[in-house]
Image: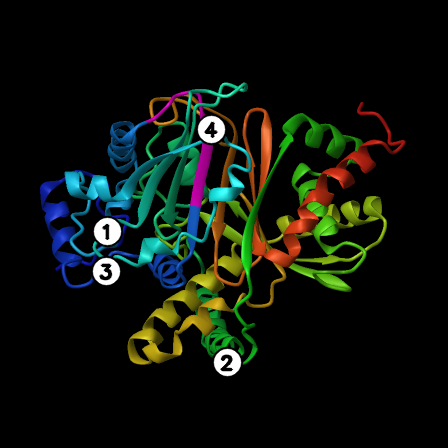
């Protein structure tokens, strides 16, 4: 049988769909790329949530699922009994949608955010859920009648998919790329060689250095987009550099909660240029960054901007290509030595103190997000990893944290830091 990846069957050819169904009959994850496999095994989850002016019910959520799976058919993959590309029967729709009433929206969205590991418990259910909370007595003073959340395994959706679905646009991964940039064979050998060194090193480090399980929690923060643009212009830095600086400086604090000298971060961004060494599903690029800790915020943010500029002037594909090769080797090893891949391995976050994720702008449009209003909150969870996801909308940018609970109280310091810097005597924008 022809080899399939999760990207081969967005088209509705009956023959392609039949072969895809046959491919997953014995192994539901057979269509996953190596990157997808890694995130599936790590039980990484993502979420989207926003308030709505409409009071939704089960029927509305089931219609939303139908529209989502039509636009992102990868949502029909990865579980026992999956029929790739086919609509869900009623019993599955009923199992993955839920609605409950609440007295108020106080504390939302934070109070209903959680790791979402139940997605992996029932192997015969799709790897996503759509749920809503509806306010008793109708809309509140801000016109919010309900709040909707989509929670999914990260192996099925990335930030660009969330942005597309928010606009009710196709988010499938099967559109063929007419031309992929060729990675020189010597470079491919180099990436493979590095993976043969990094994979056992990763395995040993994970089993020796993986931290004990720690309490993890969620926090959300919404900031007016124009405030960040204005301040970054006054400072003469990129807006993303300002956001990175606000988060890391506030979380680290005077106590140096994250690191005393250098904060080791990985940040991600979208790259539409495709290479033949790319994963066939994910479009994301992972970049390594080291932020030297400085007491003065102005010095700190400008140093971060200089670091970001230097990183992005270089080849931004190298780290991702090495990671792709490493995922491939881990998948091969796991088939022979599955006992090495327990919770301790997946809890190890590698050499990073913090992961910073930039996703494309999220703007509501069309039937899927009809009635939804900003701010829009999106984030992810990976066991044992401190994460912050930045989600720009029309009016707001949300900062979405999933991290050790000991860091969450410092999220409140971000707004205080922002106000303090805004109050400084800085040059006005030209």
CB within 8 Å, label 1 to label 3:
no
Question: Between disc 4 and disc 3, whose residue precedes?
Answer: 3
Residue position marked by numbered label 3 in the rendering: 30
Q: Main secondary structure of the magenta part?
A: strand
- The mark lying in front, picked from 4 and 3, is 4
Q: Nearer the viewer, residue 26 or 177?
A: 26
Instruction: Identify the mark nearer the N-term, 4 or 2.
Output: 4
Q: Which residue is mark 2?
A: 204
Q: Nearer the viewer, residue 1 or 426?
A: 426
Q: Secondary structure at mark 2?
A: helix
Residue 226's image quarter? top right
**Earlier residue among tags 4 and 1:** 4
- Whole-Å distance between the Cαs marked 3 and 2? 27 Å
**Which stretch is magenta?**
47-56
Indicate the position of residue 397 as horizontal and vertical percent values.
59, 33
Disc 1 to disc 3, C-alpha distance? 16 Å
Residue that sits furthest to the right in the current view: 425
Mark 1 lies on a secondary structure that is loop
Q: Which residue is mark 4?
A: 51
Question: Is residue 164 depicted above or below 95 in this figure?
Answer: above
């Amino acid at each position: 049988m022809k080899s399939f990846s999760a990207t081969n069957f967005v088209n509705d050819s009956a023959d392609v769909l039949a072969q895809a169904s046959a491919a997953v009959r014995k192994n539901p994850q057979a269509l996953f790329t190596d990157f997808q496999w890694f995130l599936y095994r790590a039980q990484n989850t993502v979420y989207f949530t926003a308030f709505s002016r409409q009071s939704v019910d089960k029927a509305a959520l089931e219609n939303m699922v139908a529209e989502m799976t039509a636009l992102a058919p990868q949502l029909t993959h990865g579980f026992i009994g999956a029929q790739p590309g086919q609509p869900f029967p009623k019993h599955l729709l009923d199992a993955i949608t839920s609605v409950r009433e609440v007295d108020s929206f106080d504390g939302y969205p934070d109070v209903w955010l959680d790791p979402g590991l139940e997605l992996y418990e029932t192997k015969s259910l799709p790897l996503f859920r759509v749920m809503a909370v509806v306010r008793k007595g109708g809309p509140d003073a801000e016109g919010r009648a309900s709040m909707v959340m989509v929670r999914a395994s990260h192996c099925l959706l990335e930030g660009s998919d969330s942005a597309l679905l928010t606009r009710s646009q196709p988010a499938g991964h099967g559109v063929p790329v007419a031309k992929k940039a060729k990675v020189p064979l010597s470079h491919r050998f180099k990436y493979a060689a590095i993976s043969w060194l990094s994979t056992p090193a990763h395995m040993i480090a994970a089993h020796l250095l993986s931290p004990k399980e720690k309490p993890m929690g969620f926090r959300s923060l919404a900031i007016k987009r124009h405030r960040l643009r204005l301040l970054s212009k006054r400072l003469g830095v990129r807006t993303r550099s300002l956001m990175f600086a606000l988060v890391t400086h506030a979380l680290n604090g005077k106590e140096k909660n994250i690191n005393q000298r250098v904060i080791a971060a990985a940040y991600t961004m979208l790259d539409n240029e495709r290479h033949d060494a790319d994963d066939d599903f994910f479009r994301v690029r992972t970049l390594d960054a080291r932020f030297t800790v400085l007491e003065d915020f102005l010095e700190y943010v400008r140093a971060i901007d200089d670091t970001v500029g230097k990183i992005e002037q270089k080849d931004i594909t190298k780290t991702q290509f090495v990671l792709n090769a490493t995922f491939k080797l881990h998948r091969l090893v796991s088939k022979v030595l599955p006992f090495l891949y327990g919770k301790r391995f997946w809890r190890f976050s590698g050499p990073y103190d913090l992961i910073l994720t930039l996703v494309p702008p999220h703007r509501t449009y069309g039937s899927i997000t009809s009635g939804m209003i900003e701010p829009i909150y999106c984030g992810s969870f990976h066991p044992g990893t401190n994460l912050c996801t930045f989600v720009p909308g029309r009016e707001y940018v949300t900062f979405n944290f999933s991290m050790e609970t000991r860091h969450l109280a410092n999220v409140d310091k971000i707004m205080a830091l922002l106000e303090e810097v805004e109050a400084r005597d800085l040059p006005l924008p030209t």
